[in-house]
Amino acid sequence: MTTEEPSEKAQVRLGDFATQYDIEFRDLRFSVPSKKSGKPHTLILRGVSGYCRSARLTAIMGASGAGKTTLLNALAGKAPGKGSVTGQVLLNGRPFIERDFRYWGVYVMQAEPLLATATVKETIMTSALLRLPLSIPRKEKVQRVNDIIAQLGLQHCQGTMVGDEGTGGGVRGISGGERKRVTVGVGLVTQPHVLLLDEPTSGLDSETAVSIVELMRDLARQGRTVVTTIHQPNSTITNCFDDLLLLSFGQLIYMGKWTKSVEYFSSLGYKCPMYTNPSDYYMSLMKDAEASPRLVDTWKKAGGDWVTTPRLTAPEPQTPFTSGSKVVAADEPGTANGHSTLENGRGQEASEAGAADIEMGAVTRVHERVNGEAARTSAQESLNETPGTSGPEGRGGVEGGKGRKVRMRSLQPPAWYQVWVLAIRNVQFYLRNPELMLAKLFTYIFMGGFMGLMYLRLPLDTATAGYNRSAALWISMFAFTLMPSETACSVWNQERAVITKEVKSGQYRLSSFFLAKTVVSVPFETVIAIIFTVIIYHMIGFQAKLDKYLIFMVTLILVNLISEMVGFIGGIVTKEVTIGLILISVVTYFCFAFSGFIVQPIPKYFVWLHKISYYSLAYTILVKNEFTGLNIQSPLDPLR
Ligand SMILES: Nc1ncnc2c1ncn2[C@@H]1O[C@H](COP(=O)(O)OP(=O)(O)OP(=O)(O)O)[C@@H](O)[C@H]1O
Ligand SMILES: [Mg+2]
């Protein structure tokens, strides 16, 4: 890190783990339906087995399309979309409930959406408020956020808006590297045990990339399991790696210590040339049509025994992978029982001790028989620790006995508190986007003035008196139908990516977001409808009676609010804003057609549309309100 180092205290607060989580994956296969006829499916991951250990930084490398992101998705228990995943992912030796990943892990995807108008500190703070239990005092949450900001070296830009210039928006904000660090910070607030990162360094200059990888290494040293995919790392970056996982066309060709990888490939006759970065050399091997299948085959044969072996068992002395390495008895620190040492909260030393002695990917059935049960028991013990004694807040505890899936309970704050936090963020969003509100306000003032002049002081004694009056009512209502819906749909589009991600990752429910949105927008939308009513009511010359005035105003307020809601729903049910706007236009068109003004009588087969349309109801109220008690001398009086 080039920026100020965080205090020692901050380091301790962020990473004093009593429990560490190892991830093991067995025979992971991911297949997608094949486009070619006759082929049932295409395999993306072809039986990948291995593990990622706590307190270590594991780098996943491979050519583009090798399946790195797919593997990370599978580890995070992320829904595979159209494809299907088979195989097992184990947390300290036991299966876990996929949706519970959020309680102990964080998955930082490649292009993580962030709210452009929030500052760096607000972004991380909101994450803390939304995800940490209410039992943690606010002061402590602020302290934790400050610690994270210090650890990520973001102090200098903590008050700067995140922005979205780099992602196609118009808000100038922080740099790409800072953005990546903010996304990590957002995840760190729950003090996750496991961090999965997809290409956190892509698109960054080498210095920033190094600082990000150093940060990941530091986080691993605190006891976390850190797994990252990475492209073209330079030697400074590779020096930070503990373990390496090489994927070639969905299959493993190496998994083990980074420092042993050169030795492994040399033993197979693939000697990395001097002055060549090993990672570049491995990439060239994976692209080599001859070498790649051979390496896959060799790994399959040599690593096969290891696959079903529990983690942290001691190595087989004479495997081709471990020649010359020190073999440690199972009861020495850092081996099978070494996990207990890790659990005592000295992640780094214990991990280093263990790491020095254990060769990953090189354990035989003999050791499985000898040490397997011990390792498994140790893993289970760690999972059955007293709830809440350590680890991520937002995870209340761990449940489940032998053989059952690991189940965790959430200690997230209650929904009402989340609504409150989201409402504050929404207010900030509007305050930072004043043009959204001001444009709307001035449009209604202008439209009100325009309509007032259009129907200025409508007479009661002309042939068109009834028609003009009902047209004025209709067009007043019209002002609060299409525009609020379309504006809401567009505004939702600005927030769509962030809200979708937050809801999908289980931070809060979509209903909480809506409630917060409604709480914030109701006052503003009400004020707009009031201003509009004040302008047009007397200009047009509707009945000057307080009750009628109020009914007119309240009707417009309600139409405005319902239209806004319709706009949000239109935005949510469609994936693209353009489609959303088209949908809204179509719905509005039909509702208008049968609202009672355009066509009378309504054809029988469209009466149902008239009945379900809120425009019809609103228009009927407005007409009855205005025409009842009105002394009109027109043949077109709609109440005749
Ligand atoms: N849901 C899916 N449907 C169809 N194909 C998919 C799906 N998910 C992944 N793939 C395909 O699987 C292959 C591996 O994808 P993945 O994103 O895991 O690659 P990667 O190694 O992360 O590549 P990169 O380095 O470019 O990010 C790609 O060819 C991709 O098109
Ligand atoms: Mg990828």
Image: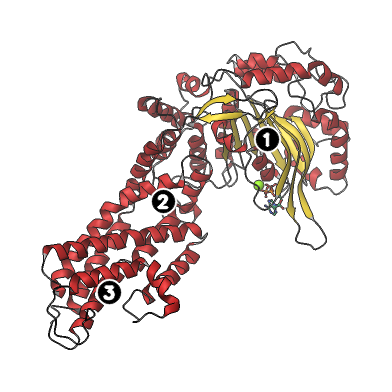
Q: Mark 2 or mark 1, which is nearer the start of the sequence?
A: 1
Q: Which residue is mark 2?
A: 172
Amino acid type indicated by mark 3: Trp
Label pair 1/2, CB-CB below 8 angstroms:
no
Mark 1 or 2, which is nearer the eye?
1
Instruction: Point out which mark residue 474 bears.
Output: 3
Q: Is residue 479 visible?
A: no
What residue is disc 1 on?
59
Q: Quadrant of residue 561?
A: bottom left
Please name the residue shown 71% across and 14% down the image: 337
- At numbered mark 1, what does the secondary structure look like: helix, strand or loop? strand
For badge 1, the amino acid type reads: Ala
Q: Is 302 in front, or is 580? A: 580
Mark 2: which amino acid? Arg
Q: Give me the disc on residue 602.
A: none
First in residue order: circle 3 vs circle 1? 1
Residue 530, placed above or below residue 278: below
Vertical placement of residue 145 versus 559, above or below: above
Marks 1 and 2 sit apart, C-alpha to C-alpha, by 32 Å
Residue depicted at 82% across the width and 16% down the height: 370
